[in-house]
Image (cartoon, grey):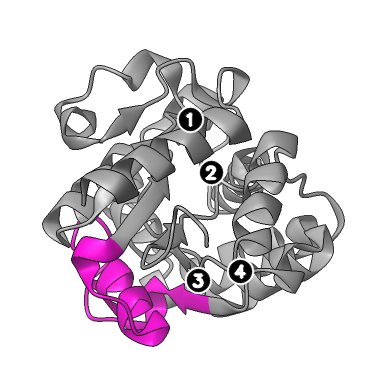
Amino acid sequence: MSGLSGMSVVFDLDGTLVDSEPNYFEAGRQVLAEHGVPDFTWADHERYVGISTLETVTLWKREYGLRASVEQLLAAKNRRYLELARTATRAYPEMRKFVELLASEGVPMAVASGSSFEAITAILAGTGLDAQLRTVVSADEVAHGKPAPDVFLEAAARLGAAPADCVVVEDAAPGAAAAHAAGMRCIAIPYVAARADASEFETAGLLVRGGQAEFTARAAYDWLVRAAASG
């Protein structure tokens, strides 16, 4: 019998399972350039890591004084992003190992992401992670994106799991806050290493301060076994 019986794991997608932020940045840079903002940098992009695409373009409209509607900006960014995501998204090798390890133990898993459902399914198919990760929740399907707990609570409902029996795997502060608000434990792997001291990460059960460079499937699995034993 697995040491993880009764436990479910809910993964964030972008920056957690896959290194998609470069594609988000490039899609955003192209869209903003078309709308008269020619100098959008990676540092600018990092301010939006962890919030949904809808919230990102809503903030852009206000911050950059864009004339296009939020709907137009959202459609343009999603279209550009999908073009890039289908051909150029890399799954983190240790994260793939972690998913395979959990699958071999029969642990129920889901993906809960701020991306569109179309983008999530395209990335999972393109990386082959869809073989193990079949339960998918997009922030577009719930009332509020992260840091609200809605996507994680919906994922738990679809898995038939109590929130207290779920562990969230996240890379961004809004996601760690959402996990805490959902009453779920969290493994946090900060995408922006300089933000590892963010107060939202203080509630994480396991904080991998060095991000993906420090994350190992075995260490995360061993922590899960201990967490399951402690209830």
Q: CA distance from mark 1 to mark 4?
A: 18 Å
Left or right of residue 114, residue 179 in this image = left
As drawn, the label of residue 120 is: 4
Q: CA distance from mark 4 to mark 2?
A: 13 Å
* Kind of residue at disc 4: Ile
In this rendering, the label closer to the viewer, 4 or 2: 2
Mark 3 and 4 residues: CB-CB less than 8 Å, in contact? Answer: no
In depth, the one of 133 and 19 nearer the eye is: 133
Vertical order, 23 against 178 (above or below): above
Mark 1 and 4 residues: CB-CB less than 8 Å, in contact? Answer: no
- Which residue is identified by label 2? 16
What residue lies at 32% left-to-right and 20% top-to-bottom? 196
Callout 2: SS: loop
What residue lies at 41% left-to-right and 35% top-to-bottom? 223
Query: Badge 2: how crowded within 10 Å, few (<14), some, or many (20+)?
Result: many
Q: Position of residue 104 (x, y in %)?
A: 68, 61
- Which residue is identified by label 1? 191
Q: Earlier in the sequence, mark 1 or mark 4?
A: 4
In this rendering, the label closer to the viewer, 3 or 4: 3
Q: Earlier in the sequence, mark 3 or mark 4?
A: 3
* Kind of residue at disc 2: Thr
In this rendering, the label closer to the viewer, 2 or 3: 3
What residue lies at 70% left-to-right and 54% top-to-bottom? 100
Q: Is residue 112 visible?
A: yes
- Which residue is identified by label 3? 108
Callout 1: SS: loop
Query: Badge 3: how crowded within 10 Å, few (<14), some, or many (20+)?
Result: many
Q: Earlier in the sequence, mark 3 or mark 1?
A: 3
